[in-house]
């Protein structure tokens, strides 16, 4: 993959961001994480069985938990260990080595671009933007099978963690929203820190 306006992969110097990377307020992200990090998330037998197949990946076998990390958004669906390695390198490239790829998505880039335009028009503040992602499936194959074999096992909407991921989004997101509403007189003029 070659960055926009470059002629080779990971060419330096990296061009100024024109929508390739969006940086959230670290203090707001830390505040939201502290508020939600101990929330108990649903875990099912089916999820535990699926995770057990990824024994060589320590975080993959953990019960669901809240963490901070970076999301890569793409207009092309991809799957597999090699593409995950690319995603990690791509995030590191676009964050000057500071980013840590955790989830993939499609929607976040469009949302962030819209918010950037609204910010330029004085309608929103980038210091108040949070992105919440939940995981319902793995982006790569488990040990012992190919990416194609893994993808063949995948049925969108039938992931073991599909409904629990929706529930996790509500549990974590509503906790943040309820705290903002509860303490709005304090947060109206100054975002949480």
Image (spheres, helix red, strand yellow):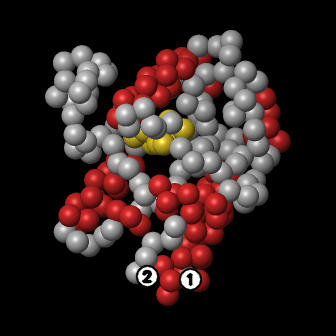
- For residue 183, which numbered disc appears in the image? 1
Question: Relative to 34, does residue 159 appear above or below in the rendering?
Answer: above
Q: Above or below — where is 167 with respect to 43?
A: below
Report the residue at 62% width, 48% height from top: 67
- Which sits in the foreground, 124 or 139? 124
Nearer to us in this view, 23 or 166: 23
Q: Residue furthest right?
A: 45
- Where's residue 18, x and y in %? 22, 44
Name the residue tied to disc 2: 188
Mark 1 or 2 closer to N-term? Answer: 1
At x 19%, y 24%, the residue is: 6
As measured in the structure, the alpha-carbon distance from the residue carrying label 1 to the one carrying label 2 is 9 Å
Q: Based on the displayed image, in which of its 4 quarters is residue 40 positioned? A: bottom right
At a point 26% along the width and 73% down the height, the residue shown is 123
Q: Residues within 10 Å of mark 2 (few under 14, many from 20)?
A: few
Q: Image point 26% across, 21% down: which residue?
A: 11
Q: Residue furthest bottom?
A: 185
Q: Looking at the image, which is closer to me, 88 or 166? A: 88
């Amino acid at each position: 993959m070659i960055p926009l306006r470059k002629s080779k992969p990971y060419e330096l110097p990296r061009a100024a961001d024109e929508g390739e990377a969006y940086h959230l307020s670290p203090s707001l992200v830390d505040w939201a994480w502290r508020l939600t990090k101990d929330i108990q998330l649903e875990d099912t037998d089916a999820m535990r069985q699926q995770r057990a197949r990824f024994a060589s990946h320590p975080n993959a076998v953990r019960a669901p938990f809240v963490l901070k990390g970076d999301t890569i958004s793409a207009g092309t669906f991809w799957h597999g260990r090699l593409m995950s390695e690319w995603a990690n390198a791509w995030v590191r490239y676009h964050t000057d080595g500071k980013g840590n790829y955790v989830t993939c998505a499609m929607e976040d880039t469009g949302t962030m671009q819209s918010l950037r335009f609204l910010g330029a028009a004085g309608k929103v503040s980038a210091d108040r933007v949070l992105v919440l992602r939940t995981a319902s499936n793995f982006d790569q194959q488990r040990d012992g099978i190919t990416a194609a074999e893994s993808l063949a096992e995948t049925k969108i909407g039938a992931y073991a963690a599909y409904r629990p991921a929706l529930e996790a989004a509500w549990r974590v997101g509503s906790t943040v929203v309820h705290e903002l509403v509860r303490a709005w007189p304090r947060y109206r003029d100054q975002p949480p820190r």
